[in-house]
Amino acid sequence: MENQEKSSKKSLFGPILVILLVVVAFVAGTQWGKIQTLTQNAAGQVAGQQDQPSAAEPKEVAPTQEPQVVEVAAVTAEDHLRGNAEAEIVLVEYSDYECPFCTRFHQTMLQVMDEYDVAWIYRHFPLSFHPNAAMLAEASECVAELGGEEAFWNFSDKLYTEESDVNPTDLDPTIEAIGVEVEAFNQCMDSGKYADAVNDDFESGQAAGVQGTPGTIIIVKGEQKDLIPGALPFDQVQEILDKYVESSN
């Protein structure tokens, strides 16, 4: 009888042990999975923080639908102007040569110039996380000094071409192609004479309420109206402009 009880206990102990081992393995596996997930999420957050500007910094701006009235520094003879200098509607664009949204919006602005009698003012807003943006802004000012407004806009058009082959570390071929003397350009760049002008543009953009690029302010008959927030496509810009064209007639 005693041997039968021992045998019965052994037969029960085996399955119980197996069940306990399965439960322990399941719990351990679940916890390990949670640990791995938390670790991966933490690593992803760190990587994302390294790739993105902080919330306090200006940023690239995708198309949005939130125009707002802003204050902008008066247009002067020092500004880069394209189109009709006497136009009642003026578009003041703050932009960054390395911003992909600005490249997209540049094509929209070219279409605006074909369709409307407006003045297009270009101002610099180089973002800190674009390594060559400030340098390219200074380069455009040297180009303007040496080749005039036509050279400035030719240089800008080249930089904002989707398939642009401009090498920011070797601008000589681009400078030569737009008809500016390369040696004089390099001397201008070495002097750093336009760093303050670029920074002044940036600060005026911040004062005007621009928080990212592109940011384009609409002025009608000297009165500030709207901020086109980001790289809106032409049809949406057209809707905004048409109401001001109608009101100015």
Image: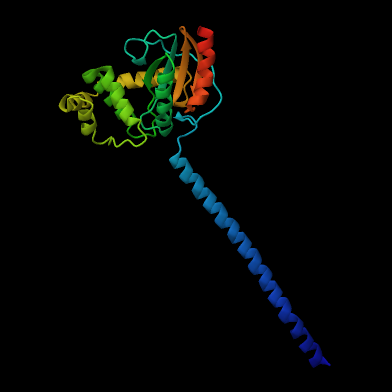
How is this picture coloured? rainbow
Residue sitting at 45 percent across and 35 percent down? 53
Residue closest to the far right = 1
Foreground of the two, 2 or 46: 46
Left or right of residue 52: residue 162: left
Residue 156 quadrant: top left
Vertical comparison of 43 with 95: above or below: below
Vertical comparison of 81 with 19: above or below: above
Residue sitting at 28 percent across and 35 percent down? 166
> Residue 207 at what x, y percent from top left?
45, 17
Foreground of the two, 159 or 246: 246
Vertical comparison of 4 with 172: above or below: below
> Residue 157 at what x, y percent from top left?
33, 27
Q: Is residue 247 visible?
A: yes
Residue 89 quadrant: top left
Residue sitting at 32 percent across and 33 percent down? 132
> Residue 160 at what x, y percent from top left?
35, 30
Marks counted in the figure total 0
Q: Which image quarter is the N terminus in?
A: bottom right
Residue 75 quadrant: top left
Left or right of residue 197: residue 36: right
Q: Is residue 141 visible?
A: no
